[in-house]
Every structure is written in structure tokens, then in C-alpha cells.
């Protein structure tokens, strides 16, 4: 089974994120960068499927030079090789442009059986790229999964919703996205870290992929960030003094909030 995993380097969630004054894109120097935490789980799921069914795991990342750190993390976990799409023209690309580039990069990998991605990244949180990649590739999509199994040429998954659990399946090849509940990613061993340094990483540009530079970057984006502000601090809430009627007061408050 040949599996492609889409990974992304994102600002550490504990870092303060800032936008540049010039074009309101992320100031990458203002925050530490890490492999997205849900992407780690996507890599782990790919490795577990590889251990069960054999094959090869290829990591694909789109980003600047320092995205190689995220790629090496995935390789040190056990992925076999990687493709790094790096090009100045990509600066400021929106979700649609990102999906176009990733779909083209996937097309350079032979005999892909399965594409795995995190359901959303912790920076943009659009949650749409895996579905758009599937549409561009003309493949079935099975998204937002908490469990994945492969039986022959069929992939099955469980999607947890507020209404319950949905059981989904599709024929391979397919694109799936996973949530943070899918697994607990392994820690890279020292042996894995050393081995990752020797694993092949191909760096390609948009021209190499046959993508017109005018379709990506800020100039090709359908959306634009104008400003950003920190999340407001949480209010102290409403305190109920219990003078023997505390239960009634709480019930009255919940009714007012339309919770009961």
C-alpha cells in the first residue's frame, strides 16, 4: 500500500502569533514552528497501516525552507521519503491554491492508494483542504475520522458527530482526513532521528509541478486577511449566592440561556 501524508509546519500554539505590516500574512519569525499536532497523528496512522499492509509512506509538505524541520520529524517517526514544495511564489496562498499545489504534488507519486491528512491545521483551521484535494484528484473522500481500517480495496472509517457515530467506507484510492482522536503519535527514536537524515527529500517548485505562479500566492488568493486581534479574555461569569434558593436561581439562569 502506497500512502501519501500531507503535513504542515505551523506556529507553536503556545507562541504569540503576529501578522506582518506589509501584507498581513503570518510573521513566521514571531513564533516557533512545529509539525502540526493533528498531522503527527496522520503520519502515525499511515505508519500503522504500512505496518499492517506493507508498502511505502511518502510525506508531502508545502512551505518555506524551515518546513524541512516538520518533514524531518515525520521521517524520523518512520516515513520513507518526502516531497517539499518550496517556492517564493507560494507566499500568501489561500486554501484553494494550497489544495491545487498539493494535488499536483500527489500526482508525482506513482500508484498512490491512500492520501491521509489532518482534518484541519491549528493555524488557519479552514478544515477544507483535504476535501478540495480529493475533488481535484477525482477521488472519493472520507473525512473527519476517529478510526480507519483497510480491508482489501475498501477503506472504512468512523466519524464522530454531535448526533452520534457515522460509519463510512469508500473504494481505494481515496483521500481521508483524521481528527485528534485517531491515535497517539509515536515518539521518534534516536535511531529514527539518525535514519531520517539519510532519507530522500525532493524539493520542487510550482514550475516543476506545472502550476502557473499567477494562480498561487497573494495575487491568486480568493481571500485576504485585513486585520487580526487577540482573543478577548474570558469574563468572570455570573455568580449565584445560595440563600436556600440556589437551585431555583441556577434553573432560572439556564432557562434564560435556553439550555433547559
Image (cartoon, rainbow, N blue to C red):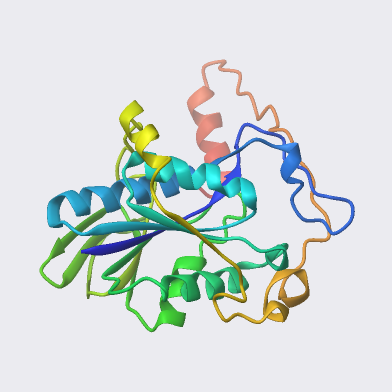
Direction from residue 67 to residue 21 in the image, left or right: right
Task: Name the side, left or right, on which 203 lies relative to 64.
Answer: left
The answer, for residue 155, to whether it is visible in the render is: yes
Image point (82%, 56%), residue name: 24
Residue in the picture at 89% in, 56% down:
22
Q: Given the current orientation, which residue lies at the most extreme left position?
A: 152
| Residue located at (61% from left, 18% from top) | 241
Between 116 and 72, the one nearer to me in the picture: 72
Outermost residue toward the front in this view: 198
Q: Position of residue 220 (x, y in %)?
A: 73, 77
Q: Eyeballing the image, is 155 above or below 13?
A: below
Is residue 122 in view from this perspective?
no
User: Which quadrant holds residue 164?
Assistant: bottom left
Q: Is residue 140 above or below residue 82?
A: below
Question: Residue 118 location, x and y as percent?
Answer: 43, 55
Tell me the quarter of the picture where residue 156 sits: bottom left
Quarter of the image with the N terminus is bottom left
Residue at 48% x, 27% y is 247
Camera-nearest residue between 137 and 146: 137
Residue that extends furthest to the top in the rendered view of this protein: 243
> Relative to the observer, which residue lies in front, 234 or 230?
230
Expressed as whole percent of the image width and height from the top left, the position of residue 61 reads 51, 57
Q: Number of marks in the image?
A: 0
Q: Residue furthest right?
A: 22
Q: Is residue 107 left or right of residue 92?
A: left
Q: Is residue 193 above or below residue 175?
A: above
Q: Nearer the viewer, residue 113 or 150?
A: 113
Amino acid at each position: 500500500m502506497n500512502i501519501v501524508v500531507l503535513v504542515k509546519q505551523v506556529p507553536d500554539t503556545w507562541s504569540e502569533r503576529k501578522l506582518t505590516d506589509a501584507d498581513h500574512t503570518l510573521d513566521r519569525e514571531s513564533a516557533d514552528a512545529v509539525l502540526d499536532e493533528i498531522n503527527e497523528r496522520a503520519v502515525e496512522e499511515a505508519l500503522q497501516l504500512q505496518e499492517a499492509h506493507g508498502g511505502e509512506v511518502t510525506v508531502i509538505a508545502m512551505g518555506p525552507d524551515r518546513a524541512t524541520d516538520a518533514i524531518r520529524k515525520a521521517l524520523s517517526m518512520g516515513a520513507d521519503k518526502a516531497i517539499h514544495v518550496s517556492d517564493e511564489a507560494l507566499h500568501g496562498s489561500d486554501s484553494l491554491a494550497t489544495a491545487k499545489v498539493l494535488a499536483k504534488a500527489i500526482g508525482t507519486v506513482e500508484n498512490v492508494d491512500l492520501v491521509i491528512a489532518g482534518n484541519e491545521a491549528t493555524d488557519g483551521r479552514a478544515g477544507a483542504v483535504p476535501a478540495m484535494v480529493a475533488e481535484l484528484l477525482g477521488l472519493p473522500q472520507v473525512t473527519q475520522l476517529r478510526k480507519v481500517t483497510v480491508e482489501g480495496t475498501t477503506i472504512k472509517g468512523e466519524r464522530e458527530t454531535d448526533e452520534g457515530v457515522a460509519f463510512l467506507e469508500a473504494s481505494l484510492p481515496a483521500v481521508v482526513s483524521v481528527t485528534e482522536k485517531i491515535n497517539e503519535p509515536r515518539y521518534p527514536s534516536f535511531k529514527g532521528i539518525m535514519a531520517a537524515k539519510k532519507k530522500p527529500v525532493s524539493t520542487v517548485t510550482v514550475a516543476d509541478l506545472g502550476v502557473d505562479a499567477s494562480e498561487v500566492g497573494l495575487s491568486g488568493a480568493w481571500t485576504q486577511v485585513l486585520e487580526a486581534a487577540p482573543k478577548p479574555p474570558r469574563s468572570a461569569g455570573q455568580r449565584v449566592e445560595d440563600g436556600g434558593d440556589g437551585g431555583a436561581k441556577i434553573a432560572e439562569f439556564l432557562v434564560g440561556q435556553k439550555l433547559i
